[in-house]
Image: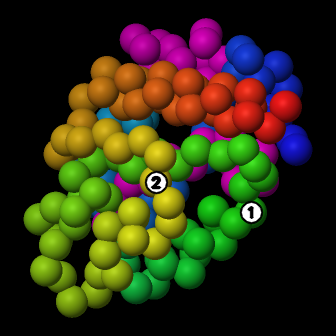
């Protein structure tokens, strides 16, 4: 089992846009600014799912992104947590009856933490990250 270095103090996150309007993505970028500064808590974005503890997914899953999302999920080492950010990822949102959707994220891969909103506030996303940390600590305790 692989964990990020200093797992109790750091959380490595990989962001995946599965077809969103980019509203949620803008809020994620806002979190990375000095106002919220998640790196002081050890939370950082990584460029590869092979190094991530958390998969942050935004948007409903389009036909083109279904296989890619599943592949990214499978590349992540255990234990892993999936966070679904925004209403579109949870139910399809305003795109719920679109011809090119395979459905919400939860129908394609298992989701552990949902953060509702269109788009959700940065504070809500940070609260979701706190829940993801708690989930990972429980998973780590179970595997020990």
Instruction: Find disc 1 in the rendering and name its residue.
Output: 75
Instruction: Find disc 2 in the rendering and name its residue.
Output: 111
- How far separated are the C-alphas under marks 1 and 2? 16 Å
Q: Nearer the viewer, residue 73 or 29?
A: 73
Residue 138 image point, x, y percent: 64, 29
User: In the picture, which quadrant includes the N terminus?
Assistant: top right
User: In the picture, which quadrant includes the C terminus?
Assistant: top right
Instruction: Give the residue at x 50% y 66%.
Output: 109
Q: In the displayed image of the protein, which residue is found farthest to the bottom?
A: 99
Residue 61 image point, x, y percent: 38, 72
The reply to whether dot 1 and dot 2 touch (C-beta < 8 Å) is no
Question: How many numbered tags mark residues here?
Answer: 2
Secondary structure beneath disc 2?
loop
Crowding at dot 2, Cα within 10 Å, few <14 / some 14-19 / many 20+, comes out as: some
Q: Earlier in the sequence, mark 1 or mark 2?
A: 1
Residue 122: tell me if it is visible.
no
Left or right? Give the position of 118 relative to 73: left
Range of magenta residues: 32-60
Instruction: Give the residue at x 73% y 34%.
Output: 142
Dividing the picture into quadrants, the one containing residue 12 is top right
């Amino acid at each position: 089992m692989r964990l990020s270095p200093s797992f109790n103090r750091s959380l490595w996150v990989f962001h995946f846009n599965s077809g969103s309007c980019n509203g949620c993505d803008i809020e994620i970028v806002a979190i990375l600014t000095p106002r919220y500064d998640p790196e002081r808590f050890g939370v950082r974005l990584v460029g590869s799912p092979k190094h991530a503890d958390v998969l942050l997914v935004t948007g409903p899953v389009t036909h083109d992104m279904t296989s890619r999302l599943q592949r990214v999920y499978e590349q992540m080492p255990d234990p892993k947590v999936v966070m679904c950010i925004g209403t579109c990822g949870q139910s399809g949102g305003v795109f719920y009856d679109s011809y090119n959707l395979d459905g919400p994220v939860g129908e394609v891969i298992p989701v552990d933490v949902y953060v509702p909103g269109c788009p959700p506030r940065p504070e809500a996303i940070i609260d979701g990250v706190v829940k993801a940390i708690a989930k990972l600590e429980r998973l780590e305790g179970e595997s020990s």
